Image: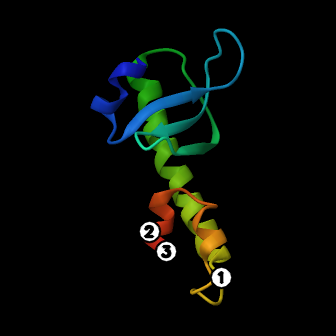
Amino acid sequence: MQPHLRKCFDNILKIEFAPGKNSKDITGMWSAELEFVPFSSIVKAEGNVEFWLRDIERMMIFSLKEFTKKALVEYPANGIERNEWLFNYAAQPVITID
């Protein structure tokens, strides 16, 4: 399934599975720029592939929404001094907030 993710989702290079042989727990996603975004909760790769791909899409949206909220709350009062903040979050929430 991994080679076809870029056809299903824009800019997802691969998904990250929990450690362990034959793990079905998906914990996050990697972008083509090799940026890792952890999921807010685990997605199970069980059953029909179209159902757990839908669950990945939902978790992708939910996780980025949660990271964007957190990034907004933690945005420095002095926006000029935001160097550390910039590298604590994925690119999409940073672009949205900044």
Q: Which label sits on residue 60?
A: none
Could you give the CA–CA distance between mark 3 and mark 2, rounded to whole angstroms?
6 Å
Badge 1 vs badge 3, beta-carbon distance below 8 Å: no
User: Along the polypeptide, which appears first: circle 2 or circle 1?
Assistant: 1
Q: Which label sits on residue 76?
A: 1
Q: Residues within 10 Å of mark 3 (few under 14, many from 20)?
A: few
Q: Amino acid at mark 1?
A: Pro
Q: Amino acid at mark 2?
A: Ile
Point 50% across, 14% down: residue: 47
> Is 62 on the left or on the right of 81, as rendered?
left
Q: Residue furthest bottom?
A: 78
**Residue 34 pos. (x, y %):** 49, 41
Q: Amino acid at mark 3?
A: Ile
**Residue 16 pos. (x, y %):** 57, 29
Tag 3 residue: 97
**Residue 33 pos. (x, y %):** 43, 44
Which residue is nearer to you in this view: 59 or 84?
84
Based on the displayed image, in which of its 4 quarters is residue 86 positioned?
Answer: bottom right
Q: Nearer the viewer, mark 1 or mark 3?
A: 1
Q: Residue furthest right?
A: 20
Point 44% across, 70% down: residue: 96
Q: Residues within 10 Å of mark 1 (few under 14, many from 20)?
A: some
Query: Which element carries disc 3, helix, strand or loop?
Result: helix
Tag 2 residue: 95
Could you give the CA–CA distance between mark 1 and mark 3, rounded to whole angstroms?
11 Å
Query: Which element carries disc 1, helix, strand or loop?
Result: loop
**Residue 2 pos. (x, y %):** 42, 21
Badge 3 vs badge 2, beta-carbon distance below 8 Å: yes
